[in-house]
Amino acid sequence: GVYLIAMAYLLNFLKFIVPIQFFHTMPEAFIEAYGWKSPLNDNQLLYLLSIGDILQMAGLVMIFAGLIRKISNNKYTYLFVAFVVAVSSQILRGFRPNIVGLDYMADLLWGKKFNVYFPVFPWSSSVLVGIYLGRIYCESDRNLLVLQRHCLLFGATILVPGMLLCYYDYDYHFSDFFHCGLGGIMYL
């Protein structure tokens, strides 16, 4: 998990900082889309370096799943935690303690701004459901038919309520895709 997080920030450095600072090849339209002008100041460069994306989320979820495994290796624990994460995502969305450094961590966990595209809450629930289904597959001696039946049953069970929740209040449950709530994550 830590390695993946480090690679995520290295990728940000390579895709943002190197083209802007070393090669001066980043299109001005990209910079202007943030409401900025060249040359970028240190705070703007730090913002680009710290953008949270799917790799940061995946690294944090790997650490999170490892902690869950230490507590209980029961497949239903993963499913329960996935449910708690999905339900609590919109409740926690955007909470920040107003402490430098911790605000950024809070954004990675449940942020609602576009400095983080895949916050751990709710996206980790999808990964945890995947672990649950993976455990079913392994426990069935890798019987693909058993896995497919569970995927169909589980998917059908959460898809329809997710769609109905999104239909009922799209802005709350689906929002902007990256920061979705319970209905959105159930639908996806």
Image (spheres, rainbow, N blue to C red):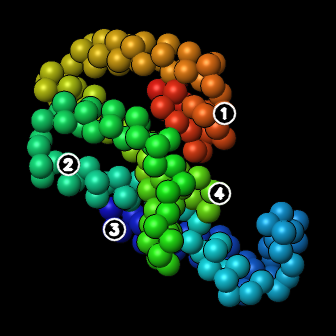
Sequence-wise, the earlier of marks 1 and 3 is 3
Name the image quarter holding residue 152.
top left
Query: Neighbour class for label 4 at 10 Å: few (<14), some, many (≥20)?
Result: some
Residue at 26 percent across and 32 percent down: it is 79
Distance between mark 1 and mark 3 Cα atoms: 34 Å
Neighbor class of circle 1 (other Cα within 10 Å; few <14, some 14-19, many 20+) is some
Residue 68's disc number: 2
Rate crowding at label 3 as few (under 14), some (14 to 19) or many (20 or more) other CA atoms within 10 Å.
few
Q: Quadrant of the N terminus?
A: bottom left
Q: Give the alpha-carbon distance from disc 2 to disc 3, as whole Å.
A: 16 Å
N-terminal of the pair, mark 1 or mark 2, is 2
Q: Is residue 55 visible?
A: no
Helix, strand or loop under label 4: loop
Q: Earlier in the sequence, mark 4 or mark 3?
A: 3
Q: Which mark is residue 142?
A: none
The residue labelled by disc 1 is 171
User: What separation in Å lies between label 4 and label 3 (alpha carbons)?
Assistant: 22 Å
Residue 3 rendering spot, x and y as whole percentages: 35, 68
What's the CA distance linking mark 2 and mark 4?
28 Å
- The reply to whether callout 1 and callout 2 are in contact (CB within 8 Å) is no
Above or below, 171 against 103 in this view is: above
Frontmost of labels 4 and 3 is 4
- Residue type beneath disc 1: Asp
Closest to the observer: 137 or 76?
76
Give me the C-alpha separation between circle 1 and circle 2. 31 Å
**Residue drawn at (60%, 34%) of the image:** 172
Cα distance in 3D space between marks 1 and 4: 16 Å
Q: Nearer the viewer, residue 183 or 131?
A: 183
- Residue depth check, mark 1 versus mark 3: number of the one nearer the observer: 1
Give the labeled residue for mark 3.
2
Above-or-below relation of 92 to 100 = above
